[in-house]
Image (spheres, rainbow, N blue to C red):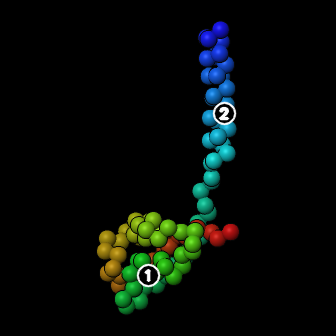
Amino acid sequence: MKIKWRKLMATLAIPAAIAAGVYFYEPPAELIEYRAEAEQGDSVWSLCAKVSSDEDCMEELVYRTMQENHIEDPANLQPGQLIVIHVKEVK
């Protein structure tokens, strides 16, 4: 009797785990591309702050922008330097 009960529980646990995973899955947010031209004194953070929304985590946005634009020093942008920033779409 105990073996049948365990098999039944194992059989029910797998579909329950799959259903929970499907329920809590959230597809990645669609990103919108902005292009910003740096001015004297701008940093990656200040440019990202101009186009970000409450949907964006600023730390992640700045890091991702630095990676995508191959920037090593985020505080030392050259005037006229074009920066591409991808932000989450606001719904």
Q: Is residue 20 above or below residue 58?
A: above
Q: Is residue 22 left or right of residue 83?
A: right
> How many labels, in total?
2
Q: Is residue 80 left or right of residue 8?
A: left
Residue 70 position by quadrant? bottom left
Marks 1/2 in contact by CB < 8 Å: the verdict is no
User: In terms of sequence position, does the residue under pointer 1 or pointer 2 come before the other?
Assistant: 2
Measured from the top left, where is residue 75 in percent x and y? 33, 79
Mark 1 to mark 2 CA distance (whole Å): 46 Å
Q: Residue 23: tell me if it is visible.
A: yes
Q: Dot 1 corresponds to which residue?
A: 46
Q: Amino acid at mark 2?
A: Ala
Q: Secondary structure at mark 2?
A: helix
Q: Residue 68: tell me if it is visible.
A: no
Q: Is residue 37 above or below residue 61?
A: below
Q: What residue is drawn where x is 39% and y is 85%?
A: 42
Please tell me which residue lies in front, 22 or 63: 22
Please identify the quadrant where the C terminus is shown: bottom right
Q: Dot 2 corresponds to which residue?
A: 16
Q: What residue is drawn where x is 38% and y is 81%?
A: 43
Q: Amino acid at mark 1?
A: Ser
Q: What residue is drawn where x is 42% and y is 85%?
A: 38
Are there few (<14), some (14-19), or many (20+) residues within 10 Å of tag 1? some
Measured from the top left, where is residue 1 in percent x and y? 65, 8
Please tell me which residue lies in front, 75 or 35: 75
Badge nearest the viewer, 1 or 2: 2
Residue 30 position by quadrant? bottom right
Q: Is residue 59 above or below residue 51?
A: above
Measured from the top left, where is residue 4 in percent x and y? 65, 12
